[in-house]
Image: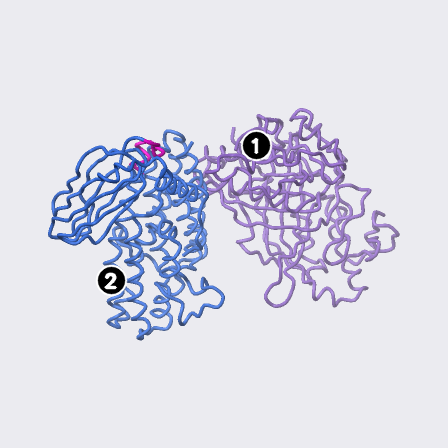
Chain colours: A blue, B purple
């Protein structure tokens, strides 16, 4: 949980996207609009009517000839979504339009609306080109986007184990499934927080409510259920409603992560923000004050930060090899320290944080600081 | 963050202040050579706002005229890598040089890459150098074998014995390293400790730290001794910052003292730090006569019993045997003399409605065994003041000699 923070880098990236999508209406070619791109979506194919089209005002005429409901996307080289259309039923047609600058793109059909989908590369020519990043950077962002998407997809069934237990009124089963249901969220939290409205619904703590909000009515999400399970030790109709709500809000999250603005800079800053989360919320034991499962969140935050770092490593290593070496070392040291708090390295069964003493917390805090300080320099090493 | 003090780089204040402007100008533009002190004496720089030279035969912050504010920090080394520790000491030295001269750390607080956090944290921007001194020390635990320094521990760096009445909190005691930051502006002192802690993440970790808001000692003999929180002048007979003979005799480690593994300490000094809690509420209920008896001085002038002026030499036999002045006086301790530069502190309240207040005692000496140990042994045994105070934190450090120039670094003698 953290207040929403838009970094300067994210704001800039946002402005650039806006320009890319809407910025060249005057140069659009009316002929292109008339012809458009034809996409025939089947269960095992995604047929596009060509490889090269004029840039500008682009129309996609989609026809679903398969047996499953499908989705169609136009993606930037880093897999960020230019435009999309969901829920195209079998035998139906749909039209997508967007202002798209010259450059390389992918058209993706997703039969059954799951998985990576079927890709076709297309090139748009003429007019102004979209700002280009290095292939390395695009690949890092694309991989991270896949990671974030996969985390969301894996999280939903885990959350269902938790919410099913709540709905069944099974206190012990719910407690057991709680921490595990949060791992995917904690690994990718900065992306979820970039939407602004989801985090306050699913991950807010009681003290994070605003003046005038009523904890009985307005407090929703994981931590509200945490308090019910560990502190109040009971499941009422209200908790069962909140379980439904959590499923719904997280389904919304899963649907939206593909549209998140992700840049190499925002990945690096996101990694730092995950360590900030650890430093301010987990090391202090504030995040999971009733369940004391802070170390599970802690580990997940570190894993998410390490994923960003690993993906940016090829770029960062060219600019600042010493920084990369230091970060490798400090990630290793922190992970080794965390491993002391679980018997099985394959499990997320960590020591309850109320059993972690003052000196041990200081040691964890030192290791977090030792990593977070060099990690704050990663963004500069990526753009240098 | 390793640029030298005279390399091009931002100064916190580009417009020189009127007061102490000449000294400040030298600090900002003159470079290391013009700033080097002559070794034995540090000219009293009383002009608040000026820069105190960082380089010299001895570290600044000992004989230097006592500044108004303190931020003291003890650090634990968190790595076993000796080379990493050496790199940190070098980086710290360069940052300290810059801050003492009133410059920003590294590439400054603004104007750098927008994607990177600034090298300097910025809260001292626009403030004068404020006579900032940064003084580094090595604690006994640094010599425990982690860094191959076991045979370099000087004999004079003893573990302090347990004194009667001590109630020491381990979390406020000890430390592998310490940095004493003194300045006339509290924000300048805090900026310095914060910056060094930041540079140190991954190599060292702050073990404890202490803010001091009011100096309780003077190393300039013509000045009045500042009062402590009991309202008394104490430590009147201090070593003066311009008394070379006195400093050589009582404060600086001589070449002959520093032998064998401890030879690197020549020109250094030993620091004892004690956090002394003062029970100000019970003291304030004590009659004036009792208060004056406890110290052995009068409250208004600070003169010893039967004398007229603060600096008049006391006639010890006229003082009560358990009075503080009589017990602490060098003549009662075989000549043991300490250079004191302690500060008053108030860290809020203690949960029982009492001020968590006291004296953060700092004393420099040539040898702890003939300095603090005999004096404190006598005081702990029978000082009438013990009814109103308690020692709650303790540390001892070997303070190496000064950093000579822009190529030298803190502790080079120890690690070479």
- The verdict on residue A132 being magenta is yes
From the viewer's side, name the closer residue of B410 and A267: A267
The chain carrying label 2 is A
Looking at the image, residue B108 sits to the left or right of residue A233; the answer is right
Q: Residue B370 at what x, y percent from top left?
A: 67, 43
Q: Chain of mark 1?
A: B
> Does dot 2 land on a helix, a strand or a loop?
helix
User: Is any part of residue A329 visible from this angle?
Assistant: no
Q: Nearer the viewer, residue A370 or B313?
A: A370
Q: Which label belongs to residue A289?
A: none
**Counting other residues with Cα less than 10 Å from the Cα at mark 2, is it few (<14), some (14-19), or many (20 or more)?**
some
Q: Residue at x 40, y 71 (%)?
A: A217
- Within-10-Å neighbours for mark 1: few <14, some 14–19, many 20+: many
Q: Which residues are magenta?
A: A127-140
| Residue A148 at least partly seen | yes
The lab-note entry on whether marks 1 and 2 share a chain reads: no
The answer to whether the residue labelled 1 contacts the one labelled 2, judged by CB atoms less than 8 Å apart, is no
| Residue A203 percent coordinates (x, y) | 37, 60
Is B116 in the magenta?
no
Question: Can you tell which mark lies on residue A160?
Answer: 2
Task: Tell me the SS state at disc 1.
Answer: helix
Residue A332 figure quarter: top left
Question: Which residue has dot 1 on it?
Answer: B94
Is residue B132 found left or right of B243 in the rendered image?
left
As drawn, A306 above or below A233: above
Q: Nearer the viewer, residue B170 or B209?
A: B209
Instruction: Tell me where residue A69 appears, x and y as whole percent.
Output: 16, 53
Rendering quarter of residue B253? top right
Q: Position of residue A65 (x, y in %)?
A: 12, 48
Q: Nearer the viewer, residue A170 or A149?
A: A149
């Amino acid at each position: 949980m953290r207040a929403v923070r838009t970094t300067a880098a994210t704001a800039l990236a946002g402005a650039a996207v806006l320009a890319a999508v809407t910025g060249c209406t005057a140069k659009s070619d009316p002929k292109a609009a008339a012809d458009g791109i034809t996409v025939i979506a089947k269960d095992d194919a995604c047929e596009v009517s060509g490889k090269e089209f004029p840039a500008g005002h682009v129309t996609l005429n989609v026809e679903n000839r398969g047996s499953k409901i499908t989705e169609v996307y136009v993606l930037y080289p880093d897999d960020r979504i230019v435009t999309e259309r969901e829920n195209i039923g079998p035998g139906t047609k749909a039209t997508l339009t967007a202002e798209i600058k010259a450059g390389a793109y992918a058209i993706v059909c997703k039969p059954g609306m799951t998985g990576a989908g079927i890709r076709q590369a297309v090139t748009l020519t003429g007019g102004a080109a979209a700002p280009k990043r290095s292939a390395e950077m695009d690949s890092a962002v694309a991989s991270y986007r896949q990671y974030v998407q996969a985390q969301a997809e894996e999280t939903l069934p885990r959350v269902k184990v938790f919410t099913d237990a709540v709905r069944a009124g099974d206190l012990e089963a719910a407690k057991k499934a709680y921490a595990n249901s949060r791992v995917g969220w904690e690994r990718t939290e900065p992306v979820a927080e970039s939407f602004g409205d989801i985090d306050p619904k699913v991950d807010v703590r009681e003290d994070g409510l605003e003046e005038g909000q009523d904890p009985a009515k307005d407090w929703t999400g994981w931590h509200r259920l945490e308090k019910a399970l560990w502190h109040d030790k009971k499941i009422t109709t209200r908790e069962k409603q909140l379980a439904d709500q959590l499923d719904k809000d997280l389904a919304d999250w899963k649907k939206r992560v593909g549209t998140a603005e992700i840049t190499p800079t925002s990945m690096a800053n996101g990694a730092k923000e995950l360590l900030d989360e650890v430093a301010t919320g987990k090391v202090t034991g504030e995040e999971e004050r009733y369940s004391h499962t802070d170390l599970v969140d802690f580990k997940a935050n570190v894993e998410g930060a390490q994923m960003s770092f690993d993906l940016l490593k090829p770029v960062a290593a060219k600019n600042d090899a010493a920084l990369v070496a230091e970060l490798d070392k400090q990630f290793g040291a922190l992970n080794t320290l965390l491993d002391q708090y679980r018997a099985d390295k394959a499990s997320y069964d960590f020591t309850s944080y109320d059993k972690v003493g003052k000196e041990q917390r200081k040691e964890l805090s030192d290791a977090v600081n030792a990593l977070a300080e060099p990690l704050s320099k990663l963004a500069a090493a990526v753009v240098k | 963050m390793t640029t030298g003090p005279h390399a091009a780089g931002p100064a916190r204040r580009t417009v020189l202040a009127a007061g102490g402007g000449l000294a400040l100008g030298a600090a900002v533009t003159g470079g290391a050579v013009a700033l080097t002190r002559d070794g034995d004496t540090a000219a009293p720089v009383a002009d608040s706002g000026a820069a105190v030279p960082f380089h010299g035969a001895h570290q600044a912050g000992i004989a230097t005229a006592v500044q108004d504010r303190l931020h003291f920090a003890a650090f634990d080394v968190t790595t076993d890598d000796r080379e990493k520790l050496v790199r940190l000491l070098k980086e710290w030295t360069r940052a300290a040089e810059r801050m003492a001269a009133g410059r920003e750390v590294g590439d400054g607080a603004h104007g750098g890459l927008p994607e990177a956090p600034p090298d300097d944290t910025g809260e001292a921007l626009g403030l004068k150098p404020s006579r900032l001194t940064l003084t580094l020390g090595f604690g006994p635990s640094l010599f425990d074998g982690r860094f191959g320094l076991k045979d370099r521990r000087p004999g004079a760096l003893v573990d302090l014995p347990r004194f009667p009445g001590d109630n020491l909190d381990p979390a406020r005691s000890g430390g592998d390293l310490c940095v004493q930051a003194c300045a006339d502006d509290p924000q300048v002192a805090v900026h310095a400790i914060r910056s060094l802690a930041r540079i140190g993440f991954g190599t060292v970790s702050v073990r404890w730290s202490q803010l001091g808001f009011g100096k309780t000692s003077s190393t300039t003999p013509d000045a009045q001794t500042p009062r402590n929180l009991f309202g008394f002048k104490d430590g009147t007979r201090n070593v003066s910052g311009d008394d070379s003979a006195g400093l050589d005799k009582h404060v600086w480690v001589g070449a002959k003292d520093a032998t064998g593994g401890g030879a690197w300490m020549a020109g250094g000094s030993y620091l004892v730090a004690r956090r002394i809690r003062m029970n100000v509420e019970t003291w304030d209920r004590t009659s004036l006569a009792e208060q004056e008896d406890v110290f052995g001085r009068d409250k208004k002038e600070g003169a010893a019993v039967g004398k007229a002026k603060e600096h008049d030499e006391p006639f010890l036999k006229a003082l009560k045997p358990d009075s503080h002045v009589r017990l602490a006086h060098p003549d009662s301790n075989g000549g043991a003399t300490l250079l004191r530069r302690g500060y008053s502190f108030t860290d809020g309240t203690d949960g029982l409605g009492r001020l968590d207040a006291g004296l953060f005692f700092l004393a420099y000496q040539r040898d702890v065994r003939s300095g603090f140990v005999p004096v404190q042994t006598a005081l702990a045994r029978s000082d009438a003041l013990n009814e109103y105070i308690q020692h709650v934190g303790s540390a001892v450090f070997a303070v190496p000699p000064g950093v000579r120039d822009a190529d030298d670094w803190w502790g080079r003698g120890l690690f070479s």
